[in-house]
Image (cartoon, helix red, strand yellow):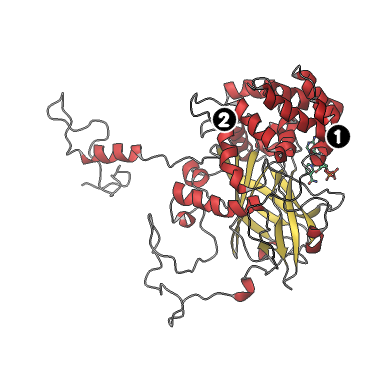
Amino acid sequence: MTTNKNNLTTSWGAPVGDNQNSMTAGSRGPTLIQDVHLLEKLAHFNRERVPERVVHAKGAGAHGYFEVTNDVSAYTKAVFLSEVGKRTPLFVRFSTVAGENGSADTVRDPRGFAVKFYTEEGNYDLVGNNTPVFFIRDAIKFPDFIHTQKRDPRTHLKNPTAVWDFWSLSPESLHQVSILMSDRGIPATLRHMHGFGSHTFKWVNAEGDGVWVKYHFKTEQGVKNLAPDVAAKIAGENPDYHTEDLFNAIEKGDLPSWKLYVQIMPLEDADTYRFDPFDVTKVWSQKDYPLIEVGRMVLDRNPENYFAEVEQATFSPGTLVPGIDVSPDKMLQGRLFAYSDAHRYRVGANHQALPINRPRSEVKNYQRDGQMRFDDNGGRSVYYEPNSFSGPTESHENKQAAYPVSGVADSVAYDHNNHYTQAGDLYRLLNEDERTRLVANIVEAMKPVEKEEIKLRQIQHFYKADPDYGKRIADGLGLSVPQQVK
Ligand code: NDP
């Protein structure tokens, strides 16, 4: 009898005779190449890792649901948002940005906040961060920016000189740098932070009318942060602190939740608003565009398998459903390419068909073949369009909403260069203790910068945001604010 319900098998399903002793010529060896089970086992082991994400490599994920709590159908025809009480299953992946897959959780870094809604019209991915803005506003700068956040090619160490050199020469980063260096730069847990879509998107209603929209997930656990010394201690003692906290909370039924709000801007305001609303280094003041409640997200189930669900989850800001379109935000436009491209490289051309990524709605198209095509590859159905065999057809009502564009094709910066007002607004919004900690965090982070010229350039940016902000950082570094900005 060779089969038994609990037989260990090869990947081809044959029972394995010995999984503890390799086959050798005589008891002392050498090992025989004819031990094909050994060969398969070692070869598969060598291939256990897929390339880790260049950014957002360390992540934690959970399943949950979204429930609509307010009628927003006047703004979007997205079916999953169409009526109060409607629930949609989802999967969330939180992450740090710069560290490797095994790096510590409690570091000062933005957190990725990526949500995959499995709607009946296909998946909708909202791939944001725990910060409302970003460091740069044009995707062409992203590889350089990330190089400064990762390891120095010579020393394989983090390089604060590169970090501050880039930021000081890219003053659009000032607002996000200020958020990162504030208390909220190290969340207490993944449950105690907000999430933001960060970019501007467009919602379109059933009549075809559009509005610009920004997303805010507000934590129902309250915002809590870690002091840098506590975070450093935890990073040494338990580098997986956030991952463990999320898993344990869900496991014991302490389910984390967030309220989703949007800010809605009429399309025509984009031409006259005092900041370019598509510039992802800026927020829209909530005094101008108040938060409108949409619904509630609850995480209620841990993954069964980390690799299958969290590592293989693929999110892209270009994964959209009817009623939700993109905006001209240049950072978003670049991400529309970069995210899916990363997943094609990292997970494969058919990554959308993996169980964690597969839409819960039916997928019908003319894409065929490719590596790891593990479904029926469309079977015998028609594989080209147009065709006379009743293949799936396009639905024009689901086209992205048309909108006029004009201009000269050229490589140009945003024409709006006030990088200082909103960073200063943030500084002025903080209480005295928060300001003191913000300044101390920045001073500590800038101390190792090797060139004084870089420190002085960056101090000018802080000074332009708020003279008190700049002066206190200069004092902390034992430098003076350069004359030309005073
Ligand atoms: P508002 O007073 O209308 O909004 C202030 C926002 O700041 C709220 O979203 C608040 O959300 C958040 N906030 C409060 N305390 C802190 C803190 N210590 N660190 C970071 N964020 C905090 O003012 P404006 O909309 O005019 O924005 C003023 C500044 O607030 C901006 O320059 C920006 O830096 C910051 N901000 C603005 C956001 C926006 O969407 N407008 C979003 C987040 C920050 P909460 O108390 O729930 O955290």
Residue 291 spot, x, y in % from top left: 81, 52
Give the CA distance from mark 1 to mark 2.
34 Å
Ligand 1 contact, mark 1 (Cβ < 8 Å): no
Residue 8 spot, x, y in % from top left: 30, 42
Q: Within 10 Å of the Cα at label 1, are there few (<14), some (14-19), or many (20+) other Cα atoms?
A: some
Mark 1 lies on residue:
428
Residue lying at 84% horizontally and 49% vertically, measured from the top left: 286
Q: Is residue 61 visible?
A: no
- Mark on residue 240? 2
Q: Is residue 364 visible?
A: yes
Q: In the figure, is residue 253 to the left or right of 468?
A: left
Disc 1 marks a residue whose amino acid type is Arg
Q: How many marks?
A: 2
Q: Nearer the viewer, residue 359 or 302?
A: 359
Q: Nearer the viewer, residue 167 or 182?
A: 167
Residue 386 spot, x, y in % from top left: 46, 78
Q: Residue furthest bottom?
A: 388
Q: Nearer the viewer, residue 424 or 379?
A: 424
Q: Quadrant of residue 16?
A: top left
Q: Nearer the viewer, mark 1 or mark 2?
A: 1
Disc 2 marks a residue whose amino acid type is Asp
Position of 135 relative to 436 (above/below): below
Marks 1 and 2 in Cβ contact (< 8 Å) = no
Mark 2 lies on a secondary structure that is loop
Ligand 1 contact, mark 2 (Cβ < 8 Å): no
